[in-house]
Amino acid sequence: MYIGHTPSRIAGRATLTSPMPDEPTPAAAAAIELPVLRPASLDALRALDARGGDAFVHRVLNTYLTSLDRHLQKARNARDTGHLGQVRAEAHTLKSSSESIGAVEFARHCALLEQRLRERAEHHPPTSAISEFDLEQALNRFFDLADVVRGAVVAELGRAIP
Amino acid sequence: MRSRTPSLGGHVNERSRVLLVDDDDVNLMLTRVALSHDFDIVEATGGEEALRLLRGWTPDLILLDARMPGLDGFETCRELRSMYGFENVPVLMLTGLDDEASIQRAFQAGATDFFVKSTQWSLLVQRLHYMLRAARTNRELERSKANLARAQDLARMGSFDWWYDPAEPFGHGLELSEQALRVFGYGPDDLLGVRDILRMMSLQDRRDIVRSLRLLLRNVSVIANDVPMQLADGRERVIHVEAEPEFAEHGQCIGYKGIVQDVTDRRHAEDSIRRLASTDALTTLPNRRQLMIRAERALEFARDRGFSVALLMIDLDRFKNINDTLGHFAGDELLIEVSQRLRSCVRHSDQFTDGLIESAGARTHRALEAVARLGGDEFVALLPEVHDDRDAERVAQRVLDALREPVYVAGQECFATASVGIAVFPRDGDNVADLLRNADVAMYAAKTAGRNASVIYSPRLAGRGPEGLLLETALHKALERNELQLHYQPKVDVTTARMVGVEALMRWQRGDRLVPAGEFIPLAEETGLIVPMTEWALREAARQARVWQDAFGFSESIAVNMPSRMFHRSDLVQQIHAAVEPHGVPPRRLLLEITEGTLMTNLDQILPTLHQLNELGVQISVDDFGTGYSSLAYLTTLPISEVKIDRSFVQKLGVTPKSTAVITTIVALARALGLRVIAEGVETLSQQNILHRQGCSHMQGFLFSRPMPGDAMPAWVERFSSTSAMSAAGLAEEAAAQPDAGGGV
């Protein structure tokens, strides 16, 4: 799956389009299509358990999927109730596991969101360090990208999204 | 908790056990898979679960995710560090790349290290290996430190660093290890500075130490000192301090590194050894060795400062009698009592050290003053500073007075008077040996003069010259040292070729030389030593009689020469008893020879004793008969058994007719009085034949035998009996042909 404004599939791999809204990119930068799950990371997972091979990768992705759903649900609930600290914790958790399965772009956004929320939390009252608008955009993108990654993982597992 | 290991508590393999704590399932799974090839992994999904697990199990390493819901990694780490046994377990905190705050917090919480989460798992594996190795090294280091601490505790030792400020060296900068603090009686958290330690010393020691420390710091020397201290709890200890200087980059001394050790026990042991080596075991007075050291030091002082030093040689009078009559235990008791009295006569100092002498002031040579025991009943008082002879005499008088009081030993009252000889440096000798010898000479002069007195050495005492004095001194000691011997010359009956008795002749084994009686008996008589020497001769003769009796059936008598002084004693009869009884021989085994001159000069005094002896069975022989002026009237009443023709007549036989006439007369007289007659000094066959013809068959002289040691006698007797039978037979025939001449009785 690739992500421009519309996800697409190329050779069974998901991609997403850069830049993300908050990233410092050249104004004229064209959308670059990147795979949602970096193949090298999946290869590394495969190598981690040489005997398990694809079966191991599948187990990891299954575990990730379960974890993603759980944390996304918690994150959504937290956003709805205004507990941004909880959102930050979920982003933190998803950051490293997403990095591990090769969801690099999503992991980077998790890190960015976590950082923004930390900065926001450390300034009382909230300063101009981050505007409510930017925060809203970052949150939206977090959930959007999560959905994309979820789709890519499901696709990787060869399963349809329930 | 999810465990991937067969058991938690019962690991038997060498693989290290790692507790992995992470709230994220994916991370847990990946990390476990990455590590499980090298380690045994136990998982926990949160801090609370991890702590629960650690209550019953200790992993080799803990891998903690920093940020977790609930109890996060930092709190978990802080908690487990407070748990017993987890103070040193390595904890690796997993953090994000951009999370510097977490890294700082990790260390603050007690984490050993941090690791930025990464998909490069091999890096994590290697980091864990490194941490485990480091932990093992740390554990070994801790164990070594603990062993060292234990060893230091056992050795009562600790280390210190002293980074001193040259401007104020006794201010701050002293760092003592826990063990070193314990040496000083302080706890591990106490602070102790140089000044505190200095305050544990006596004022004098403190001054000395500060002075020598300033010198050490100036010269950058090694510190090595034993310092007596009183610790805060009042214990008196000796602390050994040893340290070497530490230098900075440019060679300047910046401090000292060293150890302190409580060496009190060792020091006491050394003191005991030193005391034993320098003390007389019986009396605890300084011994000869210690006296020599003290006297040498006293002379050094005296030479430097122009003092006079006095040595008083103190010898107990008749101590031997006490020892012999009351036994050695009583003798020892007496010596102990005497030593205590002597101690009180001077400013006795039991111990002195070189350090004391050197460090103390000008009057400390007084600490050398003491009474020492040289051995036996000989004591020496060392007076390191006397102004004149009167000072020494006063002390001598004090000694005599102290010993005048009776001593009670073995339930008996004894009087242990002493004779004191005084020698004063530098007049009477410029070294200790000369002074001791001259004090000895003076002491014997005191004994000769009647004992219980003191005499100051003077060259006039050496009236017979130094050799004579030396001889006299040595003779005094000959008896104590068992240097006297008895040799025996047989008396024979030439008619029967039989030994009829022996005469005991005293010899003195003086070094390598056997001194004949003629060289020392006159001196012994002059000094009065002849009395104890004769007493000894009586005992020795009785002993020998018993030995011969057992060896070859000796049943004759041994003649012992008796000086006139012996008859002045009222206890001569008891002396004879005491001599023979221990050996089970009858008194008649002893024959007392008394010269004609002695007999006639003191006849009134001697006569009662002679009668007593005669009643006892002891025979009396009149020696040198014919040389004096015997009263024939007395001669008829004297209880004597034998007359001995003086050798001067025998030697002139055949030379002057008068000699033959004298001998004829003596023989006739003896026969008339019923006495045996014996000729001494027979050296030739001609003399033997003439004597025999004159009716004297008992003879003694070189013709038959020279004096010999007692153990040579059995062989001589056997030889004489066999070889003399022929000539004896000839003489017997000759005697039969001249019946008027008569046989020696």
Image (cartoon, coloured by chain):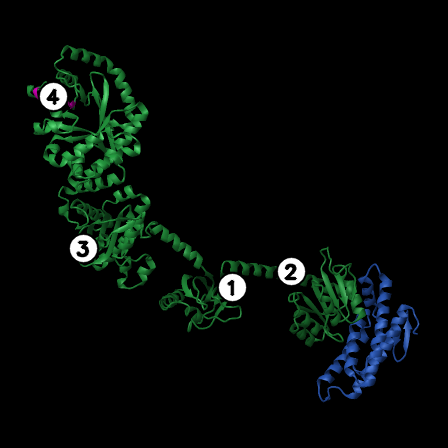
Q: Secondary structure at mark 4?
A: helix
Is residue B587 at all visible to an observer of this figure? yes
Q: Secondary structure at mark 1?
A: helix
| Chain assignment, label 4 | B
First in sequence: mark 1 or mark 3? 1
Q: Which residue is mark 2?
A: B136
| Chain assignment, label 2 | B
Q: Which residue is mark 1?
A: B179
Towards the viewer: B732 or B524: B732
> Which mark is in front, 3 or 4?
4
Q: Secondary structure at mark 2?
A: helix
Q: Which residue is mark 3?
A: B393
What's the mark number on residue B672? 4
* CA gap, disc 4 and disc 2: 119 Å
Q: Is residue A35 above or below residue B447?
A: below
* CA gap, disc 3 and disc 4: 62 Å
> Which mark is in front, 2 or 1?
1
- The span shown in magenta is B661-679
Residue B745, quarter of picture: top left
Towards the viewer: B100 or A71: A71
First in sequence: mark 4 or mark 2? 2
First in sequence: mark 2 or mark 1? 2
| Chain assignment, label 3 | B
Towards the viewer: B494 or B126: B494
Could you say where residue B666 lies in the image, as x and y percent from the top left?
Answer: 10, 22
* CA gap, disc 2 and disc 3: 81 Å
Could you say where residue B576 lies in the image, as x and y percent from the top left?
Answer: 23, 34
The chain letter of the green chain reads: B
Give the amino acid type for the residue marked by disc 2 in the picture: Arg
The chain letter of the blue chain reads: A
